[in-house]
Amino acid sequence: MAVKHPVGSIANSYSKLRESLPDLEIDPRIYGPQAIDLLAEMAKTGPNFRQCASYLMEHDIPLYVTRESKGVGAGWHENVSGECWISIDRSIGFIHSLISIGHESLHLRQTIRIRCSVEGEYHAWRFAYRLREELTSAGTALPLTEDEQKLASMPDQPTREDLKAAQRLIQKMAGPDYLIGKAPLAARDWQTAVIVPVNKLINTFLGRGEQL
Ligand SMILES: [Zn+2]
């Protein structure tokens, strides 16, 4: 059954997008009203957010909503045909969805071996703090906790020791369901070459949920 949306709210999202990314081309078959709303908000919040939104629209990466049994909030996906998409858990709110989509879209800009390593999470978590700064400047204050500040102040080019410390810190913040403890530290570690095809295979047969 078709789901209807008020014309006013759709028009509002499109006009926000037009203000922030006037030259961008968009495929309306890929993004429904809720996706447009999220992308429009990202595009107007700040430069890093805007880069994420334009990356997703330029590459036609769809957003899906799922109900995750062990909720980690959101996820990137790539199947054996190279199709990519982002899933967001139904239970997370609008602001948290913006940050999670930003985090996952950074992953999609990484190589898939980086994405499957602690190195990839290290950069995506720290990128999400920059997104939170943009939200804070735009009026939604999201101060960092002590642990988050520790991670934010680590070096841009981490050593293996830094990555190990970050792995413990992220595990502590994200809880036991977050699989970072088992991830290889760096993209070049041999384990990522094994994880990548398994991950693609799982995503090929995985139900995507409902497209936003
Ligand atoms: Zn991540």
Image (cartoon, helix red, strand yellow):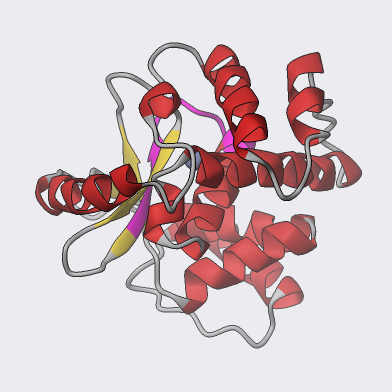
Residue 115: where, in percent of width, then height? Answer: 44, 50
The number of discs equals 0
Task: Residue at 35%, 68% (x, y): give it.
Answer: 30
In the figure, is residue 144 to the left or right of 2?
A: right
Task: Residue at 19%, 49% (x, y): give it.
Answer: 203
Q: In this rendering, does residue 6 appear at all?
A: no
Task: Check the image and report above or below for 90 versus 192.
Answer: above
Task: Check the image and report above or below for 165 versus 162.
Answer: above
> To which quarter of the image does residue 176 belong?
top left
Task: Identify which residue, 157 or 82, lies in the foreground.
Answer: 157
Task: Residue at 59%, 50% (x, y): give it.
Answer: 102
What residue range appears in magenta?
85-96
- State yes or no: residue 54 in magenta: no
Task: Residue at 25%, 45% (x, y): give it.
Answer: 195
Residue 38: where, in percent of width, then height? Answer: 57, 52
Task: Check the image and report above or below for 20 versus 204.
Answer: below
